[in-house]
Image (spheres, rainbow, N blue to C red):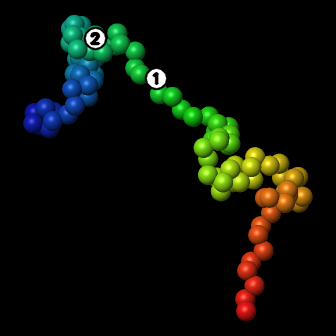
Amino acid sequence: MILHFMRLPPDVREEVLQILQMLMHKDLPLPRSAEKKNSVPPPVKVQTVPEDLLTIRPDDPPGLKRLKRLASLDTTQLKHLPPDLQLDPPPEKN
């Protein structure tokens, strides 16, 4: 059991020890690494906003620009598509 405990990441081991301290009703000081960890705020993750993905950029390929324009259309506009967004007719067979 000790080997399994030692294989855990350090932060998980500290959490287990804190839980054991609470269960035993001991008022022991926290390990120094846990105190340091709480003093540093976690890094903030930047997430893209869905509207940013539909913005047409100059470096986008033509197909992607067309898809972004189609995705940004309202459903009422789908019956009267601009000519550049309409489907190309299939090639005729000989």
Q: Position of residue 1 (x, y in %)?
A: 11, 37
Q: Amino acid at mark 2?
A: Lys
Q: Residues within 10 Å of mark 1 (few under 14, many from 20)?
A: few
Q: Is residue 46 left or right of residue 26?
A: right
Q: Evaluate whether residue 60 shows in this view.
A: yes
**In this view of the protein, which residue sits in the foreground, 28 or 91?**
91
In which quarter of the view is residue 27 placed?
A: top left
Image quarter (top left, top right, bottom left or bottom right) of the C terminus: bottom right
In the displayed structure, would residue 12 be above or below residue 32?
below
Q: Residue at x 26, y 15 (%)?
A: 34
Q: Residue at x 28, y 11 (%)?
A: 36
Most distant residue in the bottom direction: 94
The dot on residue 64 is none
**In this view of the protein, which residue sits in the foreground, 46 or 13?**
46
Q: Residue at x 21, y 26 (%)?
A: 10
Q: Position of residue 67 (x, y in %)?
A: 69, 54
The residue to which callout 2 is attached is 36
Foreground label between 1 and 2 = 1
The dot on residue 44 is 1
Circle 1 — which element?
loop
- The CA distance from mark 1 to mark 2 is 18 Å
Most distant residue in the left direction: 3
Q: Is residue 47 left or right of residue 1?
A: right
Dot 1 or dot 2, earlier in sequence: 2
Q: Position of residue 44 (x, y in %)?
A: 46, 23
